[in-house]
Image: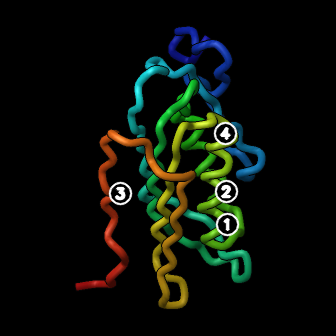
Amino acid sequence: MTESGTAAPAGLTQLGARVSLPASPEAAVLERVANPHPGLDYVVRFTCPEFTSLCPITGQPDFAHIVLDYIPGDWILESKSLKLFLGAFRNHGAFHEDCTLTIAKRVTDAIAPRWLRIGGYWYPRGGLPIDVFWQSGAPPAGIFLPPQGVEPYRGRG
């Protein structure tokens, strides 16, 4: 039973429960739910505009706007588990490229989407913004795929 007294869907351990932030991304558990429309191609978007991690050299915080788009196969990603996973990067030291691709790989491993793309729009470190992009291949024909909508960093003004 969840805190609200309702039953969580089978196999979910975090949704509806009081769960602490995982100590690291490796310790985080990504949970999944059966796709309610497995015969349709549709895009799911998760946006994390306040993603944080640590520079692995200086320990200083790094900030990013992460946009994750995927087309489900048999599974969809449970959002609370994704929030906890992304939050686990808060005290994790890794370069921008590693953080962005680790997110993509873990989501791919968890749900085996038909297609996935990620945009990591990182704010400047040392005066240089680093944006990281990856996708699993060409998107299927005929889907509606909006632009990620995050402008490159341009500073103030």
The answer to which of marks 3 and 2 sits earlier in the sequence is 2
Is disc 3 in contact with disc 1, using a CB cutoff of under 8 Å?
no
Q: Residue type at mark 1?
A: Asp
- Amino acid on which the number 2 mark rests in the picture: Thr
Q: Residue at x 55, y 63 (%)?
A: 52
Disc on res. 148: 3
Q: From the top left corner, tell me how far across and down residue 154 is, in percent.
A: 32, 82
Q: Residue furthest bottom?
A: 127
Reply above or below: 150 against 41.
below
Q: Nearer the viewer, mark 3 or mark 4?
A: 3
- Looking at the image, residue 132 lies above or below residue 88: below
**Which disc is residue 20 wearing?**
4
Mark toward the viewer: 2 or 4: 2
Position of 128 with respect to 59 (left or right) is left
Residue annotated with mark 2:
102
Image marks 3 and 2: residues in contact by CB distance under 8 Å:
no
